[in-house]
Image: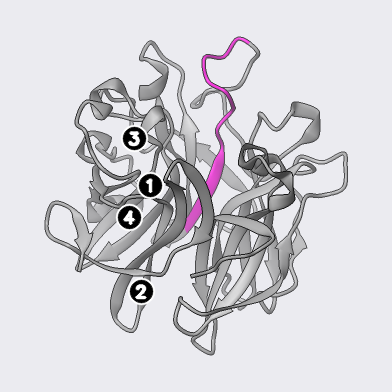
Amino acid sequence: MLKLADHWVWDSWYVIDDDGRHHVFFLRASRALQEEGRRHHRASIGHAVSENLKDWTLLPDALVHADAPAWDDQATWTGSIVREDSGRWRMFYTGVSRSEGGNVQRIGSAVSDDLIVWHREPGPQVEADPRHYERFTPESDWFDEACRDPWVVRADDGWHMLFTARVEGPEPARERGVVGHARSDDLVTWEVLPPLSRPDALGFGQIEVTQLHRVDGQWLLLFCCGKGEASDARRSLGETGDNYVVPVDDDLFGGFNGAVLNIAKARPFEHESLYAARLHDVDGRTVIIGFRNIEDGGFVGELADPIPVRWDGERLVRK
């Protein structure tokens, strides 16, 4: 596990370098804040490396908030990493600003030649387009403007980004979370597109930390949502676990041709506290790894050891 004596650790994302080592990038904030609810607006992006996803060596932080004024001058949040054709690494990440009280989220990127030293690119590159997504106002029935947690993948027609988003509509607030979508030819200029999912009575107020990953031949969408932010109908199912999985048709991944994910089909990965989990391949097997959230009524804030998993045709289960 990755546990820091002086910092809480939560959302994480992973990449393998040319030497086969696993790099984790994670949100961190000082335990000196005392109240863990304050950590989000103090978050920076930490970095560690491991041979086995269990024993970690801490490296210098990857990214901290920018100098004001900037779109990311309050905190830097969850992202993902891809490799450009040139061999350079690009990390997409979420930023919030002091001028907006941290209520408005945007997505930008930083680049690195070695995964150690990162340089911000001009941004933001993606923000909530009011043609497709809900914007924040003081009268909003939700607490923020969701445009965060970018997950970037390559398909036949370019690069695609999935992100946490919400839509306006007559549905209750806890049903209007959607999978946001944007596309790019060059990882720099992005077109924000309509969402890949729709509000649903069995839906969620927010579909956080999305990831596409193939497990046992099946493409899956993994995401998380706290129980208190799921729809009434979803909560009535009495499910155990805050991480959910939806099977994805190959045509969605191959071309992102407008197919819509059916969020009502989401099934939980059952675990007592794991949150913001990621799927990752190690030596030909798939594991799930995330942070320990609430246990015995308190926030833990450390990365758990990886758990081997398989797809049984309906659910993601422990192997």
Left-right relation of 309 to 68: left
- Kindly report the distance in space between the C-alpha atoms of the residues bearing marks 2 and 3: 26 Å
Residue 73 position in % (x across, y down): 80, 43
Give the foreground label among 4 and 1. Answer: 1
In the rendering, at what x and y percent does residue 219 appear?
A: 26, 58
The residue at the point 41 percent across, 29 percent down is 229
Q: In the displayed image of the protein, which residue is found farthest to the front?
A: 296
Give residue 115's position: percent from left, percent from top: 65, 74
Q: Residue furthest left?
A: 313
Alpha carbon separation for disc pair 2 and 4: 18 Å
Distance from label 2 to label 1 (Cα)?
17 Å
Q: Classify mark 1: residues with Cα within 10 Å, few (<14), some (14-19) or many (20+).
A: many
Sequence-earlier tag: 2 or 4: 4
Three-letter amino acid code at the position of disc 2: Asp
Q: Is residue 144 highlighted in magenta?
A: yes
The residue that disc 4 covers is 253
**Amino acid identity at mark 3:** Ser
Residue at screen point 28% across, 77% down: 285
Q: Amino acid at mark 1?
A: Phe
Give the CA separation, mark 4 to mark 3: 14 Å
Circle 2/circle 4 CB separation < 8 Å: no
Q: In the image, which disc is placed on residue 223?
A: 1
